[in-house]
Amino acid sequence: MIYLIFFLTLNFSCVEKEEADKEKNKTELVGNSNADTLKFNNGISSIFQDSKGNYWYGSRQEGVALFDGQTYTYFTTNKGLPDNQIRSIKEDNNGNIWFETANGISSYDGKRIANHTIIENAISQNEWTKTSNDLWFSAGNKEGVYKYDGKRLNYLAFPKPKVINPNNLYSVTSISEGKNDILWFGTYAGVFGYNGSDFIIINDETLELDIETEPLHIRSIFEDSKGRLWIGNNGIGVLLRDADTIINFSEKNNLIHPTSSRRGDKSQPGTLEHVFAIEEDGKGNIWFGDRDTGVWKYDGDNIKNYTDSLGQSNGFVHSIYKDNDDELWFVLTNGDVYKFNGKIFNREF
């Protein structure tokens, strides 16, 4: 089935309303550990490799660990973080490392942790701009995003269309930017594409979906090297936006079971219905992480399920990360982490 995309273009004035709040930079020293093994008990939530080659591991409830190739350095609330639950890790152009936690945004300059005050804008559309230096973060349950422009951290609300499905809100689940210079925000209820001036909105209404039988419930988005946008859903599989059309990739490849409710029910083996992670490797292959059926790879012609590659860990893949060497890391909700070196999967944690 092919859906036409309706481009909803919204223009906003340049009138700016600034709050007088200054950014708070609470700083704390960080402690080192000489341990050569990772000391997380509750699993890894996110992985990031910085420009120096160091690995950063975010945990579910135990802060962040930095591995420089020899030792681990741990960052927790005791060392200045606002929360020990880490949702994402990023690096700015100055080499500072940023942490999105469950209770705020922090940065690390190599010596100290700084916690940043978020400026809430009454007329947030006035702040919607985009440069290559910006950092973008999920705003938790809010229907918008946090943007750091090099000076301050702003909350920006989405120009929300009419709510079609009250059970799905426009809070961010995934962010992607690719070759077309469009910043894509995946939310439970739809996708917002922002090019620096206008918005593209993809939701149940624009796709003419029946929310009773196949509602959007977006958990991942990714723009690949060809400019195609992959949209992972929790129920209706993967949608693929290519040029001016969107198809249901899972449906086209017979990867939705005939008896599926296309909602939250458990997937049958051999299906791709609940996609929480999408990434592209150095060869242009597209990888998917499914809630129930593990890891999948699409090479442009064929799609393969690596059912047995993760051993007893095969199951809920909630994130995929590509490091500086083009090796893929697969993070599972049970705490296991696997790395694919182009040939085999190796368990790292």
Image (tube, rainbow, N blue to C red):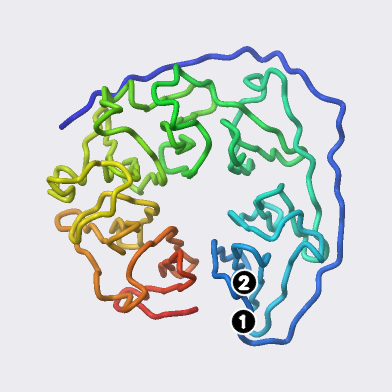
Q: Residue at x 68, y 86 (%)?
A: 35
Percent x, y for residue 31?
A: 81, 74
Instruction: Give the label on residue 69, or none.
Output: 1
Q: Residue 346, relative to residue 97: is it above or below?
A: below
Q: Quadrant of residue 41?
A: bottom right
Q: Residue at x 64, y 38 (%)?
A: 146
For label 2, the SS is loop
Q: Residue 44, relative to residue 1: is it above or below?
A: below
- Inspect the image, locate mark 2, and give the three-letter code of the amino acid beneath it: Asn
Instruction: Give the label on residue 291, or none.
Output: none
**Along the line of sight, the residue nearer the viewer: 285 or 181:** 285
Q: Quadrant of residue 334?
A: bottom left
Percent x, y for residue 129?
A: 61, 28
Q: Is residue 169 left or right of residue 228?
A: right
Q: Which residue matches tag 2?
A: 54
**Along the line of sight, the residue nearer the viewer: 306 or 150:** 306
